[in-house]
Amino acid sequence: MILTDWLRHWKYPSDAETLRQRIQMDPRWSAALQAYLSHPFVQPATPLSNLRFLALDFETTGLAPAHDQVLSIGMVDLTLEAIDIASHEELLINHGQFIKPETAQINGLTPHALAQGISLADGMNRLLERAQGKILLAHHCQIEKCFIATFLRHHYQLQSFPACFVDTLDIEKRFSYAGKSRQHDSYQLDDLRRYYHLPDYCSHSAASDAFACGELFLVQTKKLNLQKTPIRQLLTR
């Protein structure tokens, strides 16, 4: 069992930098992917106050990357000092043919709107361009991680996605008293924002949800005194 675990870790290490270094880049890959993989990740001991973050949110047709589709990608840059409002961006993906009536009612994305969008490859390349040198931030980040990893596997046969992710849901569960004592009735983004007395935004927009996640993160880091915490303590697996 120990040998099996060691071999699994050697093939798919949990450390993003080790994984990045083991990837043999293919010159046919996009320039954005090659640039992203060429840039070393931050040192594990770096405190949050010294880092740059990219808050992400995806609107999708469902939660299973194997057969669901990304409809839009929201992004915004931030540090612990401020959110860069000018960097706020939403990319519509031309996946209108995959729209489901129930999701259109929730997120307002219609086939007509998405027909004006860009390809998923262009959207992911834009994300990789903006992610270079930054910590990725999301609420329940497994959704974004899985969709990105599935795209890279299908388009580039890249079996693992090296990235440094911080999850605001995970922070609340692990570092807050309310989270550790299970006082929260819900860990939804909107509900945690209300708990911290943050204003309501238009939900189910990738751009507004990315911004909302960034704001929640800034409040969490200050309320929970995480500014000097080494990034290794917050990274998700």
Image: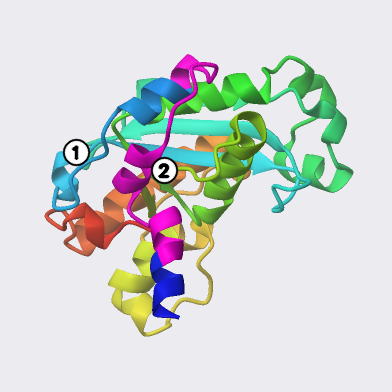
User: Which residues, given as a range, are shown in magenta?
Assistant: 7-32
**134 or 6, nearer to the observer:** 6
- Percent x, y of residue 163: 39, 43
Cα–Cα span, label 1 and label 2: 26 Å
The residue identified by callout 1 is: 81
| Residue located at (26% from left, 34% from top) | 40
182 to 114, vertically: above or below: below
**Looking at the image, residue 164 lies above or below residue 122:** below
Q: Quadrant of residue 123?
A: top right
What residue did someone put label 2 on?
Answer: 162
Q: Amino acid at mark 2?
A: Pro
**Who is closer to the viewer here, 123 or 162?**
162
Q: Nearer the viewer, residue 2 or 115?
A: 2
Residue 54 image-quadrant placement = top left
Q: What quarter of the picture does the C terminus occupy?
A: bottom left
Question: Where residue 80 sits: x, y (%)?
Answer: 21, 42
Q: Is residue 198 above or below residue 57?
A: below
**Dot 2: within a 10 Å radius of its alpha carbon, few (fewer than 14), some, or many (20 or more) residues?**
many
Residue 17 lies in the magenta stretch: yes
Q: Is residue 9 above or below residue 33?
A: below
Rendering coords of residue 141 (x, y %): 49, 52
Q: Amino acid at mark 1?
A: Glu
| Residue 11 appears left or right of 105 | left
Depth check: give the residue in front, 145 or 116.
Answer: 145
Q: Residue at x 31, y 35 (%)?
A: 134
Which element is circle 2 on?
loop
Q: Which mark is residue 195?
A: none
Which label lies toward us, 1 or 2? 2
Q: Circle 1 — which element?
A: loop
